[in-house]
Amino acid sequence: MMPDESPGIVSQHIFKLFQEHRATPFIFVEPWGNFGDQLLWMGAEKLAKLAGVHHQSVNVGTFLHTDYPSHVGVYINGGGGINPLYPETTAMQAFLKSVGRYPITILGPQTFPQDINFIKREIVNKLPHGSPGAAVLFAREKLSYNIIKPLLPGWIEPGLDHDTALNLQATDLTTSVPHRRFDLYAIRNDKEAFSKNQRDLLAIWIDPIHFCFDFNQWLALHHRAKRIVTNRLHSSILGSILGIPTTLLPNSYHKNHSVWEHSLQQCGILWRDEIELRPLAQKVNAIPPLRQLLELPFTQRLLRVFIHRARYRSLVP
């Protein structure tokens, strides 16, 4: 755990902002997302509870189609969804609706892309020209903060704070002590996937977001690992919370490395640009015919049947 001023609190700036507005009832807006976004959400709600903020939680669809009393504050969950990879930036839609209508709007810690034209087009140019209420927009690492700060109008305050999931501790999530049975390669295979040139073909990879059918199973999968290697940011954060040796790999843009540099290296998370292959895996990769055989979908399915189900049998849906 990184040093902080209050026990169990890492996102100090958000916490103090909540304390300043504890007399204001809040609407907490949860944009669409996956299990990692739920971890973010739980960390933000913990901060609100510790700060004495009373709030009502709603999903972004409800928020966008509902008018709330003019005296409420609005907090919008953080994340990485405001970028060109995801066409529907629901967090920003909620922010644009809220600013100017309510006395305080807080956009939780985000990662922003390095695409300045996208930020101007989708965020800055859609902002109203001034606002009677306060608005604070948080980045969760220094690169995003440095990107967004000079682009914002003067009436929006830029902020820098840690990913809110980092406010969670193991006791916030589970009380069990599992038998740690396997190395977990939690590897995403979507728009944010990294290059797979350095793949350990003798290890079983899964994308926990697609493998698990609910948050509790996602949590249990990580909780039973003795080591985690991942390119999913919140798999690494969960590993840190649970005290599991964890290595974080790149994703397709700067998010993983930027958050690691700002927060996760202080939590003991290791960084690798590529998966570190075991000696046997290095030998396999050096033999093209054997590598090609192991890369076949049929071979990978067989490996999943004989190894994957044996290791994760209690977790398979």
Image (cartoon, rainbow, N blue to C red):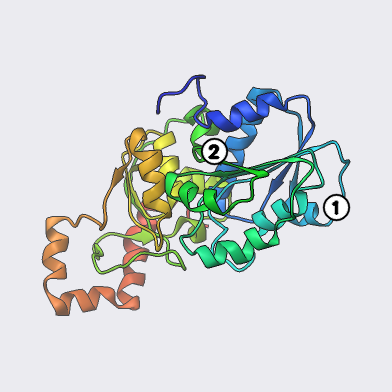
Amino acid at circle 2: Thr
Front-lying residue, 6 or 214:
6
Q: Measuring 60% from the left and 51% from the top, which residue is drawn there? A: 152
Front-lying residue, 29 or 23:
23
Q: Is residue 316 above or below residue 19?
A: below
Quarter of the image that includes the N terminus? top left
Q: Is residue 189 found left or right of 123 in the rendered image? A: left
Point out residue 244 in the picture as x, y percentages from the top left corner: 35, 37
Q: Is residue 124 above or below residue 292?
A: above
Q: Secondary structure at mark 2?
A: helix
Query: Given the current orientation, which residue lies at the most extreme top position?
Result: 6
Point out residue 200 in the picture as x, y percentages from the top left corner: 24, 62
Q: Measuring 51% from the left and 61% from the top, which residue is drawn there? A: 210
Q: Measuring 26% from the left and 51% from the top, which residue is drawn there? A: 272
Q: Is residue 1 found left or right of 200 in the rendered image? A: right
| Residue that numbered label 1 is attached to | 66
Give the quadrant of residue 72: top right
Front-lying residue, 164 or 237:
164
Label 1 and label 2: CA atoms lie apart by 26 Å
Q: Is residue 66 above or below residue 122?
A: above
Point out residue 157 in the picture as x, y percentages from the top left corner: 62, 41
Sequence order check, earlier mark of 1 and 2:
1
Q: Secondary structure at mark 1?
A: loop
| Residue that numbered label 2 is attached to | 164
| Residue 314 seen in this snapshot | no
Q: Which mark is residue 95?
A: none
Determine whether label 1 and label 2 are within 8 Å by CB. no
Q: Is residue 63 found left or right of 79 in the rendered image? A: right
- Circle 1 residues within 10 Å: few <14, some 14–19, many ≥20: few
Point out residue 216 in the picture as x, y percentages from the top left corner: 56, 44
